[in-house]
Image (spheres, rainbow, N blue to C red):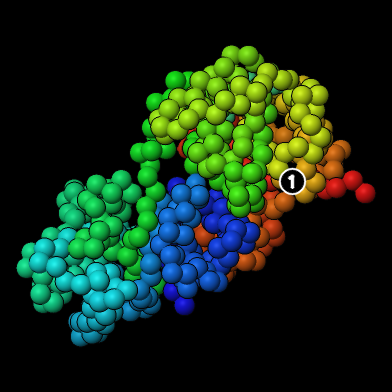
C-alpha cells in the first residue's frame, strides 16, 4: 500500500481535523496513520490504485485549506537509526558509521527508477532537501538535524546521483546564517514552484519526522499560495485587521462535508462582510448565497465576487445580485425558502476591533447584550432555511481581557433552544496516541478548535453543528 505525506498548514490541529474529516467523508477514503506538528501520514483505501491518482492528489491539494504539500512516501527510517547515526554526543564512532551507511542505503534504494524519486538519471539534476521536524522547538532539530543531518543528506544524495551517471548535480542551498543558528524553515511551496521541483530531473526530497522516525518522500503537489494571496489582497474591498483568512475559509467549507457535485450544492453566508468565505466557495464551485444587514457590505461582496470572476477570466454569473442580499439575520427566513440550503458557513459579528484588551465587564456586556442575542437569532433562523442534517460551520469569538481571562459565548447552551447538535470537530480516537504532551489530543471528542495569531485579542473558535430533523 502506498502512503502519502501531507505537510500541514500553520494551524496543525485544525489541519489534521480537516484532513481526517476529508478522509472520512469524501470519496477518497483513508486514514491518518501517524502525525507530528508538521506532517500527517495518510493511507488511502483505494486512491493509489486509480490510474489517474495524480489528478486526484491535485484535487485534494486544491480542496484542503490546511495542506501545504503532498508527497509520496518511498521509505521510512526509524528514529533509533537516525539518533544512532546523528547523536547529541558521539560515544562509538563505529556505531555511528554503520547507522549512517544504513541511511545511505535507504536513500539509494529510493532514489532512481520507476516510482522512485527520479524516474531516471539525467545529465543535469537538481534537488532540495526539506526536513520537517516533529516539533520546531525541539533541540534535536536545531542542533542536529539542521546542522549535521541536512549537510550529510545534501552531500550523500549528490554523490549517489553522480555515481549513477548524472554529470551535473546541484542542490538547494539554504542561507548559511539560518543553518548556523539552527533556525531553518523547509522550503515554502512557492519555492517548489519557482525551482520547478515537480519536474522529472528536479525534486524536493522530504524527510518528515514523527516521534517514530523519518518518512522519506518526494513532493508531488504543492499549494499555490500566490493565487490565494492575490484573491485575498488584491480584491477591491478588504479589511486586513479583521478578515477571516482564505485557509480558514476553505477549512470551514470542508467541515460542511459537502464534497460531491459542489456545483449543485447551495451554501449560505448570512454575515458576508466583504465576502471572503463566498469568494472561496465560488472558487470551489459551490452555488453561493449571502446576506448582511449593511447595504455597503452587500455591495462590497458583489464587487469582490465580480472582480474574482474577472481574474479567473470566467463569465460573471448574472444571478449573483439575486443571491447576495441585504437582510438582518432576524429576517433571514422571510427572504429564503425553508430547507433551502445544504450548508451554512459563516463568521458572524465577533465584536469591535479592540486595540487594547478590554476590561472584563466591558467584554461581558458585549457578549450578554449584543453577541448572545445575535447568535440566538442566527441559530433560530438558520434552523428554518437549512435542510435536515445540514451542517453549519461557524466561528465564534473568544475575547481576551485585561486581567488575562477569556470570555466567550456558550454556544452549546444557545443551540439547546433549537434542534442543532454539536458535531465534534475531531475524534482523537481515530489518531494514534502520542507520548509527547505537545502532540496529544484529549481522549474525548474535541468540540471545537481555535484559530488565532499570537497576541490576538479576539480569537476565533471553530464549531460545527448539524440540524436534527423535527420528529
Ligand atoms: C465579522 S464580519 C464578517 C466578515 C467576513 N467573514 C469577511 O471576510 O469580510 C460580520 C458581519 O456581520 C454583519 N452583521 C452584524 N450584525 C448583523 C445582523 N444582525 N444581521 C446581518 N448581518 C449582521 C456585519 O455587518 C458584518 O459585515
Q: Nearer the viewer, residue 70 or 362?
A: 70
Residue depicted at 55% across the width and 29% down the height: 317
Is residue 389 rendered to the left or right of residue 452? right
Q: Nearer the viewer, residue 284 or 91?
A: 284
Q: Is residue 295 visible?
A: yes
Above or below: residue 36 compared with residue 49: above
Query: Where does the image place residue 96, in percent across and percent down from the top left?
Result: 23, 80
Q: Is residue 209 visible?
A: no
Query: Where does the image place residue 272, in percent across and percent down from the top left?
Result: 61, 26
Query: Where does the image place residue 251, in percent across and percent down from the top left?
Result: 55, 46
Q: Nearer the viewer, residue 356 or 434?
A: 434
Residue depicted at 14% across the width and 68% down the height: 122
Give neighbour class at mark 1: few <14, some 14-19, many 20+ (Cα, 10 Å).
many
Above or below: residue 75 compared with residue 399: below
Is residue 250 rendered to the left or right of residue 194? right
Residue depicted at 42% across the width and 34% down the height: 312
Residue depicted at 56% across the width and 38% down the height: 281
Give the secondary structure at mark 1: strand
> Mark 1 = which residue?
390
* Occupied quadrant, residue 285: top right
Is residue 91 rendered to the left or right of residue 450? left
Query: Where does the image place residue 351, in percent across and percent down from the top left?
Result: 64, 24
Above or below: residue 42 compared with residue 97: above
Is residue 303 rendered to the left or right of residue 169? right
Q: Nearer the viewer, residue 77 or 161?
A: 161
Above or below: residue 432 compared with residue 471: below
Amino acid at each position: 500500500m502506498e502512503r502519502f505525506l501531507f505537510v500541514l498548514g500553520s494551524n496543525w490541529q485544525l489541519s489534521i481535523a480537516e484532513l481526517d474529516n476529508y478522509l472520512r467523508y469524501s470519496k477518497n477514503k483513508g486514514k491518518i496513520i501517524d502525525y507530528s506538528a508538521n506532517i500527517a501520514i495518510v493511507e488511502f483505501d483505494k486512491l493509489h490504485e486509480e490510474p489517474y491518482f495524480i489528478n486526484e492528489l491535485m484535487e485534494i491539494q486544491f480542496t484542503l485549506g490546511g495542506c501545504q504539500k503532498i508527497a509520496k512516501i518511498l521509505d521510512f527510517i526509524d528514529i533509533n537509526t537516525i539518533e544512532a547515526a546523528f547523536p547529541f554526543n558521539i560515544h562509538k564512532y563505529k556505531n555511528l558509521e554503520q547507522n549512517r551507511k544504513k541511511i545511505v542505503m535507504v536513500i539509494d534504494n529510493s532514489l532512481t527508477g520507476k516510482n522512485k524519486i527520479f524516474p531516471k538519471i539525467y545529465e543535469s539534476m537538481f534537488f532540495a532537501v526539506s526536513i520537517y521536524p516533529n516539533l520546531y522547538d525541539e533541540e534535536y532539530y536545531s542542533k542536529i538535524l539542521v546542522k549535521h543531518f541536512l549537510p550529510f543528506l545534501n552531500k550523500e544524495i549528490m554523490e549517489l546521483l553522480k555515481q549513477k551517471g548524472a554529470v551535473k548535480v546541484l542542490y538547494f542551498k539554504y542561507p548559511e546564517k539560518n543553518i548556523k543558528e539552527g533556525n531553518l524553515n523547509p522550503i515554502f511551496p512557492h519555492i517548489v514552484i519557482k525551482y520547478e521541483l515537480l519536474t522529472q530531473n528536479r525534486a524536493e526530497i522530504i524527510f518528515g519526522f514523527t516521534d517514530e522516525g523519518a518518512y522519506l518522500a518526494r513532493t508531488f503537489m504543492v499549494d499555490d499560495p500566490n493565487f490565494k494571496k492575490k484573491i485575498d489582497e488584491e480584491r477591491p474591498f478588504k479589511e486586513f485587521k479583521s478578515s477571516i483568512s482564505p485557509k480558514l475559509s476553505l477549512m470551514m467549507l470542508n467541515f460542511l462535508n459537502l464534497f460531491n457535485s459542489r456545483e449543485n450544492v447551495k451554501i449560505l453566508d448570512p454575515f458576508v462582510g466583504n465576502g471572503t468565505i463566498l469568494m472561496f466557495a465560488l472558487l470551489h464551485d459551490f452555488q453561493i448565497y449571502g446576506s448582511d444587514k449593511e447595504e455597503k457590505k452587500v455591495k462590497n461582496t458583489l464587487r469582490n465576487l465580480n472582480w474574482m470572476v474577472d481574474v479567473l477570466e470566467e463569465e460573471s454569473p448574472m444571478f449573483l445580485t439575486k443571491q447576495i442580499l441585504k437582510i438582518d439575520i432576524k429576517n433571514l427566513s422571510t427572504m429564503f425558502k425553508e430547507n433551502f440550503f445544504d450548508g451554512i458557513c459563516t463568521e458572524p459579528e465577533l465584536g469591535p476591533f479592540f486595540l487594547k484588551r478590554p476590561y472584563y465587564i466591558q467584554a461581558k456586556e458585549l457578549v450578554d447584550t449584543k453577541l448572545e442575542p445575535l447568535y440566538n437569532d442566527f441559530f433560530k433562523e438558520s434552523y428554518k432555511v437549512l435542510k435536515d442534517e445540514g451542517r453549519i460551520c461557524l466561528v465564534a469569538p473568544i475575547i481576551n481581557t485585561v486581567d488575562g481571562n477569556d470570555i466567550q459565548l456558550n454556544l452549546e447552551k444557545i443551540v439547546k433552544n433549537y434542534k442543532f447538535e454539536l458535531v465534534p470537530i475531531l475524534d482523537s480516537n481515530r489518531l494514534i496516541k502520542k507520548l509527547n504532551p505537545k502532540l496529544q489530543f484529549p481522549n474525548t471528542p474535541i468540540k471545537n478548535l481555535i484559530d488565532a495569531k499570537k497576541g490576538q485579542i479576539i480569537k476565533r473558535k471553530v464549531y460545527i453543528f448539524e440540524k436534527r430533523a423535527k420528529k
